[in-house]
Image: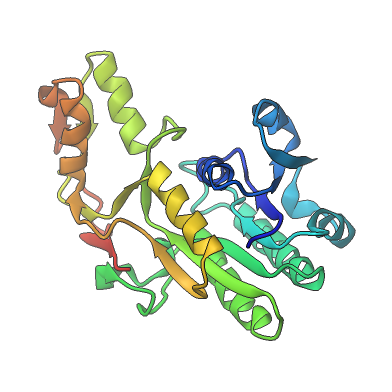
């Protein structure tokens, strides 16, 4: 039986779905949220408490120690993820350092299990079909920081009694998604009866609805598996097929202008998660 769960990033794209599932499962949850986003949690029933901070990754060891008291399971979903900026941002180093401190304190205060959130971008994407055995080859500061966290925490937790899980996310879409991302962009254009300019759309990707991702993360967190786990659909679908699926909701495939934007030739042709 899982005791008190501590969830960071509870108002984020991923974190809010993790919180939803935890509460559906009847878990007792303490959440960490940015001070400005605290109102979003005001009407959420069933929370043990809400801890606010202007910047989780700048907090002190003493702050983390107080927050982790009495916690059985930590799910750390917070990270800087602003579309168009996060991949190259120096803030990834701040997130890395804060994450390592968080994990260290969680172990020292007696957490039984610590779950971190990684990314498929940690892998060597040229492999195409990616299992947890695929070699890592991060190519951006974001992916590098995530991979560094994984390596460091794998070693740290191997010397501790705390269990460690690293959930690598693939291509998520759905409820609460930033409007600058692919699916919301298409919806916005079609809702206005305006064309959506896209690449050829031939890239194969592993797309997963964010609600299902929340389920998979919580199942991994509450289960017994250790180490890396892929949060994915394992279903290959092209970007074009996904765009057409969205367009069919509006009956406007004619507004999808494939090839209007040039393909990114360094973009891998296939990124598919294998469980």
Q: Eyeballing the image, is 217 above or below 44? A: below
The residue lying furthest to the bottom in this view is: 159
Q: Please name the colour scheme applied to the rendered image.
A: rainbow
**Residue 83: horizontal and vertical position, in percent?**
47, 41
Q: Nearer the viewer, residue 176 or 128?
A: 176
Which residue is depicted at the point 66% across and 25% down? 43
The residue lying furthest to the front in this view is: 1
Q: Work out which quarter of the rendered image holds the N terminus and state it.
A: bottom right
**Residue 76: horizontal and vertical position, in percent?**
62, 56
Q: Eyeballing the image, is 272 above or below 77? A: below
Residue 30 seen: yes
Q: Work out which quarter of the rendered image holds the C terminus and state it.
A: bottom left
**Residue 122: horizontal and vertical position, in percent?**
44, 67
The residue lying furthest to the top in this view is: 192
* Left or right, residue 76 beside residue 256: right
Residue 144 seen: no
Q: Nearer the viewer, residue 250 or 81?
A: 250
Which residue is depicted at the point 85% across and 60% down? 65
Q: Quadrant of residue 247?
A: top left
* Left or right, residue 257 beside residue 24: left
Q: Nearer the viewer, residue 86 or 187?
A: 187
Q: How many marks?
A: 0
The residue lying furthest to the right in this view is: 62
**Residue 90: horizontal and vertical position, in percent?**
61, 55
Which residue is depicted at the point 67% across and 37% down? 46
Q: Eyeballing the image, is 46 above or below 106? A: above
């Amino acid at each position: 039986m899982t005791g008190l769960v501590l969830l960071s990033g509870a108002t984020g794209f991923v974190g809010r779905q993790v919180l939803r599932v935890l509460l559906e499962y009847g878990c007792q949850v303490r959440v960490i949220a940015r001070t400005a986003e605290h109102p979003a949690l005001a009407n959420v029933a069933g929370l043990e408490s809400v801890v606010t901070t202007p910047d989780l990754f700048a907090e002190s060891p003493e702050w983390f120690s107080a927050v982790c008291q009495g916690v059985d399971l930590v799910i750390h979903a917070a990270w800087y993820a602003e579309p168009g900026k996060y991949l190259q941002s120096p803030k990834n180093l701040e997130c890395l350092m804060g994450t390592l401190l968080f994990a260290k304190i969680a172990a020292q205060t007696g957490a039984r299990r610590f779950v971190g959130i990684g990314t498929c971008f940690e892998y060597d994407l040229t492999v195409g079909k990616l299992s947890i055995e695929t070699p890592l080859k991060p190519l951006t500061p974001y992916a590098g920081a995530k991979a560094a966290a994984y390596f460091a925490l794998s070693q740290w937790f191997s010397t501790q009694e705390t269990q460690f899980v690293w959930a690598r996310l693939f291509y998520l879409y759905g409820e609460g998604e930033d409007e600058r991302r692919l699916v919301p962009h298409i919806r916005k254009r079609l809702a206005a009866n305006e064309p959506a300019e896209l690449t050829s759309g031939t890239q194969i990707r592993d797309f997963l609805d964010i609600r299902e991702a929340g389920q998979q993360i919580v199942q991994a967190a509450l289960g017994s598996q250790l180490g890396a786990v892929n949060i994915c659909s394992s279903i290959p679908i092209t970007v074009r097929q996904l765009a057409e699926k969205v367009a069919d909701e509006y009956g406007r495939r004619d507004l999808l202008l494939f090839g209007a934007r040039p393909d990114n030739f360094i973009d891998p042709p296939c990124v598919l998660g294998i469980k």
